[in-house]
Every structure is written in C-alpha cells, then in structure tokens.
Image (cartoon, rainbow, N blue to C red):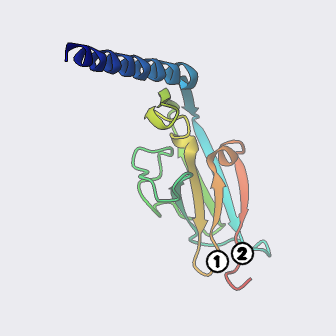
C-alpha cells in the first residue's frame, strides 16, 4: 500500500516536472519582446473610378487584418477618425488621414506549449489594421496599413459593382 502511494506521488512529481520543463521550453523558443511605432504625419488617399473621375463621399472603415471585422478607431491610429465612416472623401475624391502624435506600442509575446498565445501579439496594433474604402455603387477596395504609411499620397481605384 505504501509502495503504491509512493509510486503515485513520484508519477505526479514527474508529470509536473515535465509540464514545467515544456512550459519553459515553449517560452524560450517562442518569446518575443517587440516595439512598433505609429508615425506622425498626413496621408492623402485619392479615390477615383476606372476613368479617373474622383468619387465623392467614399468612406474609410478600419478592419482587423486577421478577422476582417470593424475595429474601434476612437483613439486609434489616426486623429481625425472618430468611428466607422467618420472620414469620407471630398469633392476631389481626397481622403485625408492625420496623426499629430507619434506613439509607440508593443509588448511581450509567447506561445504556451507552442499553441496558446500569451501577451501582446506583434500581429496586432495599428499596422495590423486594414483600410476598406467603399462608396455606393462600387466594389470596396482594401489597403494594408504598411502600404498607406509608405506613401504620402496614394490613388485608390474603385470598380463599378457591375464589372
């Protein structure tokens, strides 16, 4: 009886040691400390149709690049975006995106047992946002944040829904 109880205790200790070892090994092999930076500046998107005619009242929505769902923009990547559809093109088809303050974001991230994410994922943050430009009668177009931030001015072409 005492031998059996001792065997169970040893088995539990071995299993706990293996669990701690695997946890530590998964942390060592997947741990990342990362920092991102949202730059300060102004970016202009010119929304046009296939003939080059400016599209009035095209709107910008911000989507998660992973889920495709709308993300909250209050306090988000651009100062002049206060919610879905709050930024629209003017009579010249221009959409101005402004950021008056550069800010850092980041954190630490690792995967428990190489599966479950723990911490702030580097795939998140402002650069993980996709801009969807849409206007009535046109197919929406999407741009990733890296493309937008890499150019001060960018032309976006929307195609008719019938095409």
Identify whether 33 is placed above or below 150: above
Identify whether 105 is placed above or below 67: above
Say which residue appears at 23% left-offset and 18% top-offset: 5
Could you tell me how far apart the alpha carbons at marks 2 and 1 are, in whole angstroms? 5 Å
Give the SS element for disc 2.
loop
Indicate which disc residue 138 carries. Answer: 1
- Estimate how packed mark 2 is, as few (under 14), some (14 to 19) or many (20 or more) residues with alpha carbons within 10 Å: some
- Estimate how packed mark 1 is, as few (under 14), some (14 to 19) or many (20 or more) residues with alpha carbons within 10 Å: some
**Name of the residue lying farthest toward the right:** 51
Residue at which label 2 appears = 159
Say which residue appears at 55% left-offset and 24% top-offset: 32
Q: Are marks 2 and 1 in contact (CB under 8 Å)?
A: yes
Give the SS element for disc 1.
loop
Q: Which of 149 and 24 is in front in this view?
A: 24
Say which residue appears at 45% left-offset and 54% top-offset: 71
Identify whether 132 is placed above or below 115: below
Q: Where is residue 143 in the image (x, y as percent from the top left)?
A: 65, 55
Q: Position of residue 161 (x, y in %)?
A: 67, 81
Mark closest to the chain's N terminus, 2 or 1: 1
Q: Position of residue 57 (x, y in %)?
A: 56, 71
Q: Position of residue 124 (x, y in %)?
A: 51, 40
Q: Give the side of residue 81 with respect to residue 90, left or right.
A: left
Counting every numbered tag in the picture gives 2
**Name of the residue lying farthest toward the bottom:** 162
Q: In which quarter of the image is the C terminus?
A: bottom right
Q: In which quarter of the image is the N terminus?
A: top left
Q: Give the side of residue 21 with respect to residue 34, left or right.
A: left
Identify whether 147 is placed above or below 105: below
Indicate which disc residue 29 carries. Answer: none
Say which residue appears at 72% left-offset and 54% top-offset: 154
């Amino acid at each position: 009886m005492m031998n059996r109880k001792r065997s169970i205790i040893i088995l539990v200790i071995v299993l706990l040691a293996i669990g701690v070892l695997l946890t530590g090994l998964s942390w060592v092999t997947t741990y990342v400390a990362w920092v991102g930076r949202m730059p300060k500046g102004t970016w202009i998107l010119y929304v046009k149709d296939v003939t080059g005619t400016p599209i009035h009242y095209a709107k910008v929505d911000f989507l998660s690049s992973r889920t495709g769902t709308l993300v909250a923009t209050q306090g988000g990547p651009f100062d002049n975006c206060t919610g879905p559809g709050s930024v629209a093109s003017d009579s010249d088809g221009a959409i101005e995106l402004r950021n008056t303050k550069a800010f850092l974001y980041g954190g630490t991230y690792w995967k428990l047992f190489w599966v479950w994410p723990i911490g702030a994922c580097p795939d998140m943050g402002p650069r993980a946002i996709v801009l969807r430009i849409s206007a009535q009668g046109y197919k929406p177009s999407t741009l990733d944040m890296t493309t937008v931030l890499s150019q001060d001015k960018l032309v976006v072409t929307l195609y008719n829904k019938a095409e």
